[in-house]
Image (spheres, rainbow, N blue to C red):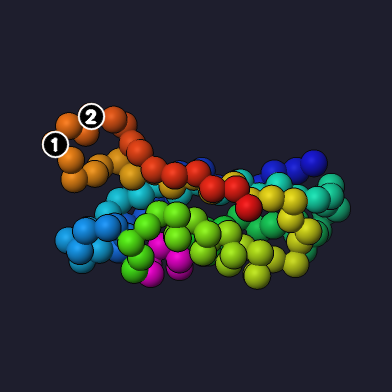
Amino acid sequence: MFVVFLDSQEVQSPVGVYEFERKAGVKLFISVKVQLHHTPDINHIQHTLDYTQLVDIVNREACKERQLLETLAADIAAAIHSQSSTAIENIHIRIEKPKIPHDGYRAKSCGIEYTS
């Protein structure tokens, strides 16, 4: 089994429940792990998932306005499935938001994880 991953891609995204978050954009760190059904032929890129595809998908989806991180994660997973000819076992996405508009917030980050 192989897992192709992208760790903590930093994006500025118009995502948030509050309108000011969507207008100004928020910093997010997006990680993606794609587990493949099979062992790819090591010498042929078309038999695996190209890392640059993950970067492009994450960057493109992060530019779209949404209220929820959950929606962003589901949309990233759907885009990976639709653009890959590789047999995918599952996709795990972690989206971290380092700052939230809350006076008591002292955590390094908060966010969501999604597996499809």
Given residues 19 and 31, the one toward you in this image is: 19
* Nearer the observer, 72 or 4: 72
Residue 106's label in the rendered image is: 2
Residue 68 is situated, as x and y percent measured from the top left of the image, at 37, 57
**Can you see residue 111?**
yes
Please identify the quarter of the rendering in which residue 47 is found: bottom right
Residue occupied by mark 1: 103
The magenta-colored residue range is 60-64
On the rendered structure, is 56 left or right of 81? left
Mark 2, secondary structure of its residue? loop
What residue is drawn where x is 18% and y is 45%? 101
Residue 62 in magenta stretch: yes
From the viewer's side, name the closer residue of 99 and 70. 70
Query: Which quadrant of the rendered structure holds the N terminus?
Result: top right
Q: Secondary structure at mark 1?
A: loop
Vertical order, 104 against 31 (above or below): above
Q: Quadrant of residue 64?
A: bottom left
Q: Say which of marks 2 and 1 sits in front.
A: 1
Is 11 magenta? The answer is: no
The residue that appears at 84% across and 50% down in the rendered structure is 38
Residue 106's spot in the image, x, y percent? 23, 29
Residue 63: x, y in percent? 37, 67
Answer few, some or many: residues within 10 Å of disc 1's Cα (few below 14, many 20 plus, some between 14 and 19). Answer: few
